[in-house]
Image: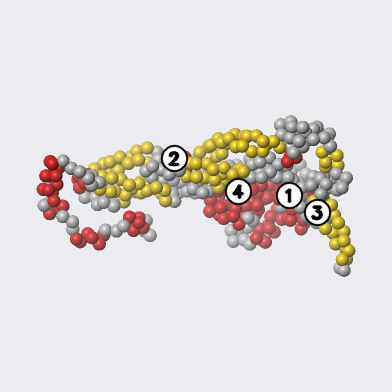
Amino acid sequence: MAKRDYYEVLGVSKSATADEMKKAYRKLAMEHHPDRNPGDKAAEEKFKEAAEAYDVLSTPEKKAKYDQFGHAGMGANAGYGPGGMNMDDIFAHFGDIFESAFGGSFGGGHFHQFTGGFGSSGRRQQQRRRTNRGTDLRVRVKLSLEEIQKGVEKKIKVRKKIACDTCGGTGAASRDAFKTCETCKGMGQVTRVTNTFIGQMQQTSVCPTCQGEGRIITQKCKKCNGNGVMEGEEIITIRIPAGVENGMQLSIPGKGNAAVHGGMAGDLIVLVEELEHPIFERVQHNLHYNLFVNITEAVLGESVEVPTLDGKVRVKIDAGTQSGKLLRLRGKGLPAMNSYGTGDIIICVNIWTPQSVTKEEKELLEKLRKSPNFKPNPKNQKNNKGFFDRIKDYFGG
């Protein structure tokens, strides 16, 4: 199923303010919250959909990319932000949203005591624990214009931190090798009460003993020494959409470094590097090509072959063609991301002047030099524009 427009998901316009988007997301999150809709998969999917939409539209950099490229600009799989997160990840990512409604924050860091909400105390306790997150990885992928034209699937081998294959990433020697943290009683956070002139103040922070996890390993895994991660490598498939540009970044959630103790993996950030093409120059979605013809082809006219990214095609050179004339091959350029438009190939005709000639050729040229038709016409000098001026006129600029 195609992704819905993020503005449509939140029910806001493109001109909506940050507060309006936050209010709209809070309303949807409360309506489709899993504790209010137990066992309702449709509600859970809407909850995740709203979280993904708000993540993109509430972040200026992501919003700018989405406004320009739509879903195609959000990553190789058109998935971005929390699209790959589970429910606890969403609670941790948007703790401030739920804090204002439920009186507490679902996630790590500093938050006030939970005073309301839904569901069991065990679930609230789990949501209060800090979620470890692995670091992001960055890779550079080089693409030819042919690959950019059609989109491409690349398989790359990435050296990174992976979950320990002995303990499954938990860091413990067995499932039972844990105990509840005595400092925080499994909550993952501690609260300190201080008296001030305005009354008692509560300050809540991550538990220093268990680092917010709520439990302590009693027997460490010998292979990873209790970290839950090890050095390894993974072959990752990257699907790059057609029309990407040099310097563009794509994000693949969950394919970065694994997190300690079974937390959420980081993202893989893919930087697109466009390879220089031997004959074409890219200008946005158009391709520029210099075609060289000899003097007789320009004078008499000719049908010549020109290359495209899909193979060669023939174009007609009219008799009397002047050097610098522009021809267009419509739809033979590059596709625009997240739109139906495709660029063109712009051909600039150049007349090739030989640097050496034979005696017979020189005699012919001497005869032509004396012909009135081969003398430049001063009336045409005003039309002798530069290449970029002709490009501007060609497109009506």
Residue 241 rendering spot, x and y as whole percentages: 52, 43
Residue at image position (86%, 68%) is 198
List the single residue furthest toward the top. Answer: 166
Residue picked out by circle 1 = 92
Q: Quadrant of residue 182?
A: top right
Label 2 vs label 4, nearer the camera: 2
Specify few, some or many for label 2: CA neighbours under 10 Å numbering under 14, 14-19, or 20 or more.
some
Mark 4 falls on what kind of element?
loop
Q: CA distance from mark 2 to mark 1?
A: 42 Å
Residue 9 vertical placement versus 313 (above, below): below
Q: Earlier in the sequence, mark 1 or mark 4?
A: 4
Mark 1 falls on what kind of element?
helix
List the single residue furthest toward the bottom. Answer: 197
Q: CA distance from mark 2 to mark 4?
A: 30 Å
Callout 2–callout 3 Cβ contact below 8 Å: no
Residue picked out by circle 4 = 4
Disc sitting over residue 205 in the figure = 3
Residue 19 vertical placement versus 46 (above, below): below
Q: CA distance from mark 1 to mark 4?
A: 24 Å
Residue 249 rendering spot, x and y as whole percentages: 55, 47
Callout 2–callout 4 Cβ contact below 8 Å: no
| Figure quadrant of the C terminus | bottom left
Mark 3 falls on what kind of element?
strand
Residue at image position (33%, 55%) is 387
Disc sitting over residue 146 in the figure = 2
Residue at image position (66%, 45%) is 135
Identified by mark 1, the residue type is Ala
Q: CA distance from mark 2 to mark 3?
A: 53 Å
